[in-house]
Image (cartoon, helix red, strand yellow):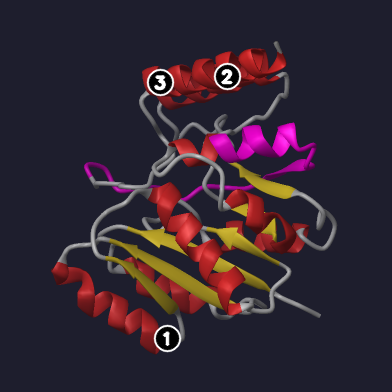
């Protein structure tokens, strides 16, 4: 039975990523691909350690953005013809716990035909009020423009079946826009999108999270409005 490949886009990752990868290796997965998205040279030693742990490390000479990093990993899988039933995308800065990944991994046995989203619990008191309100607003606006209700459109913890990788490599967006564009295109193609509740990892205060799924609300609204207008023009 084919197993899943875990894919981690990483920009200047925390040292804790090494321990996280060691725990991931204990799960029934095929491999871990880490995309070094133009990290500073001082992080080279960490990426070498990740290779020693069995990770495939792909490197961008400069920072190209999370979307481009994910597409680099997907293209690598397709070109190398690695045997896998799909990929699970995971954050490199403590956004997700191993238990979260395990929860999504278990769900692939049931929802194997579509994209699975690991949905964070924004009712938890540890989340700042602004994060809760923003997440609710994003979901409402997404439903208004795209006509599909999703509880957490910004989550970076996702399972994607291998059969969807070819068209996902062509989805627009080189940075964080890619996450939302992926969902919009999946809905357009009538690809099932499933939601699985997960916990969340507590992030250290004042830490820099390069690929965190908390984004500028104005940019999110602009992106959804742009997609909505593009969709209307294509239907005329």
Picture quadrant where residue 25 is located? bottom right
**Is mark 1 in CB contact (under 8 Å) with mark 3?**
no
Disc 2 vs disc 3: Cβ atoms closer than 8 Å? no
Horizontal side of residue 63 vs 18, given as left or right:
left
Magenta span of residues: 181-206
The C terminus is located in which quarter? top right
- Residue at 39% in and 72% down: 58
Q: Of label 2 and label 1, which has the lower sequence position?
A: 1
Residue 206: percent from left, percent from top: 22, 42
- For the residues bearing labels 2 and 1, Cβ distance under 8 angstroms: no
Question: What separation in Å lies between label 1 and label 3 (alpha carbons)?
Answer: 38 Å
Secondary structure type for disc 2? helix
Q: Earlier in the sequence, mark 2 or mark 3?
A: 3
Within 10 angstroms of label 2, few (less than 14), some, or many (20 or more) residues?
Answer: few
Q: Which residue is mark 2?
A: 230
Q: Residues within 10 Å of mark 1 (few under 14, many from 20)?
A: some
Instruction: Determine the residue positioned at 52% across, 70% down.
Output: 76
Quarter of the figure that contains the N terminus: bottom right
Q: CA distance from mark 2 to mark 3?
A: 20 Å
- Residue mark closest to the camera, 2 vs 3: 2
Q: Is residue 184 left or right of residue 10?
A: right
Q: Residue at x 24, y 47 (%)?
A: 207
Q: Secondary structure at mark 3?
A: helix
Dot in front, 2 or 1: 2
Q: Which residue is mark 1?
A: 53
Report the residue that reaches farthest toward the left: 42
Q: Which mark is residue 217?
A: 3
């Amino acid at each position: 039975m084919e197993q899943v490949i875990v894919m981690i886009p990483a920009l200047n990752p925390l040292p804790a990523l090494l321990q996280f990868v060691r725990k991931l290796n204990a799960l029934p997965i095929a491999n871990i691909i880490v995309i070094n998205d133009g990290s500073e040279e001082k992080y080279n030693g960490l990426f070498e350690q990740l290779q020693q742990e069995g990770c495939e490390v792909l490197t961008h000479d400069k920072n190209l953005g999370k979307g481009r990093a994910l597409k680099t990993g997907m293209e690598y899988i397709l070109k190398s013809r690695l045997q896998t039933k799909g990929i699970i995308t995971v954050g490199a800065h403590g956004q997700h716990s191993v238990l979260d990944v395990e929860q999504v991994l278990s769900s692939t046995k049931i929802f194997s035909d579509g994209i699975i989203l690991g949905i964070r619990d924004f009712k938890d008191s540890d989340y700042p009020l602004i994060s809760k309100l923003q997440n609710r607003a994003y979901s409402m606006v997404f439903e208004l423009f795209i006509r599909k209700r999703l509880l957490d459109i910004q989550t970076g913890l996702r399972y994607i079946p291998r059969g969807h990788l070819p068209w996902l490599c062509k989805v627009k967006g080189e940075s964080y826009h890619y996450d939302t564009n992926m969902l919009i295109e999946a809905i357009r193609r009538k690809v099932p999108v499933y939601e699985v509740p997960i916990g969340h990892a507590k992030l250290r205060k004042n830490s820099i999270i390069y690929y965190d799924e908390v984004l500028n609300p104005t940019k999110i609204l602009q992106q959804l409005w742009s997609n909505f207008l593009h969709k209307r023009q294509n239907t005329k």
